[in-house]
Image (cartoon, rainbow, N blue to C red):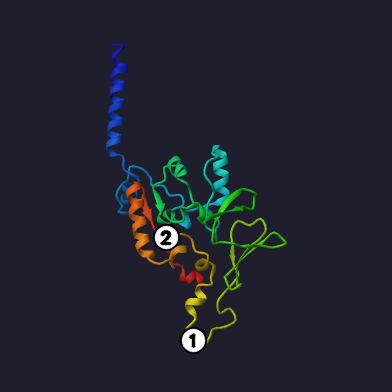
Amino acid sequence: MGLAVPKIGVWLGRGDALRAASTMMTPRERILAAIEHRQPDKVPVDLGATPSSGISAIAYGNLKQHLGITQGATRLYDVVQQLAQPEDFILDRFGVDVVDIGRAFNTETSAWQPTTLADGQAALYPAWFNPERQPDGSFVARMKDGLDIAHMPAGGAFFDQSYFPYVEGYPADFRDLSAEMGRILWAALVHSPWDHAGDPGFWDTLRAKALELRRTSDRALMIVIGCNLFEWG
């Protein structure tokens, strides 16, 4: 009898494991269940699928150091807020259920260039982003025509808007509204995939990359469209 108890215990443990496995959802199923107000097998987790749920590049580097991770690199896909794009092994480590389709863009090494964060950590900026370091250690981001549109103070963790359309008064008409809105930092320094929106065949490329990401990942996919018109105003 004494031998039977452990056997029964092991059998029950295996049964529980089998039942748990049969009800376990994939990350995509978990997200969809939550959206549809169905009970998921556990609370869905997001880290970096949107800039609103992202992680500061400095914090991301600190996290990797804390975990003893030396592989990979800190890529700042959102340069305005200085947010890192979480790497696959971090997503796996924390059971993240959703990813941004923007991560399917800028995958080539040539799409990035080295930079140094405010705390001295090494990181990577998109190749198109070249803020000017000032004598006091601050940074200025400019349009191609030299217009000053964003500042980050020395030791800062994000860029602040410095150009405000119509701040001196409204024009007689708004025929230049599109161009003016394009000078606001949120549009001029846009994160992926929208930094490729002007590329030929962008929409076809976006569709193809989204489908490939869906095929190769069981995570839910998010595409970020910044509908912050009132914030800009």
- Up-down: is 190 above or below 155? below
Q: x and y percent of residue 22 in the render?
A: 27, 37
Q: Amino acid at mark 2?
A: Val
What's the mark number on residue 173? 1
Left or right of 146 in this view: 30: left
Q: x and y percent of residue 222 in the render?
A: 38, 56
Residue toward you, 193 or 3? 193
Secondary structure of the residue carrying numbered label 1 = loop
- Up-down: is 104 above or below 199? above
Q: Residue furthest bottom?
A: 172
Dot 2 crowding, Cα within 10 Å, few <14, some 14–19, many 20+: some
Residue toward you, 188 or 63? 188
- Up-down: is 186 above or below 212? below
Q: Residue furthest right?
A: 135
- Up-down: is 34 above or below 200? above
Secondary structure of the residue carrying numbered label 2 = loop
Q: Residue at x 50, y 72 (%)?
A: 182
Q: CA distance from mark 1 to mark 2?
A: 31 Å
Q: Residue at x 28, y 14 (%)?
A: 4
Q: Residue at x 45, y 40 (%)?
A: 93
Q: Are marks 1 and 2 in contact (CB under 8 Å)?
A: no
Q: x and y percent of residue 162 in the render?
A: 60, 70
Q: Earlier in the sequence, mark 1 or mark 2?
A: 1
Left or right of 193 in this view: 212: left
Q: Which residue is mark 2?
A: 224
Residue toward you, 226 or 199? 199
Dividing the picture into quarters, in which one does residue 135 lie? bottom right
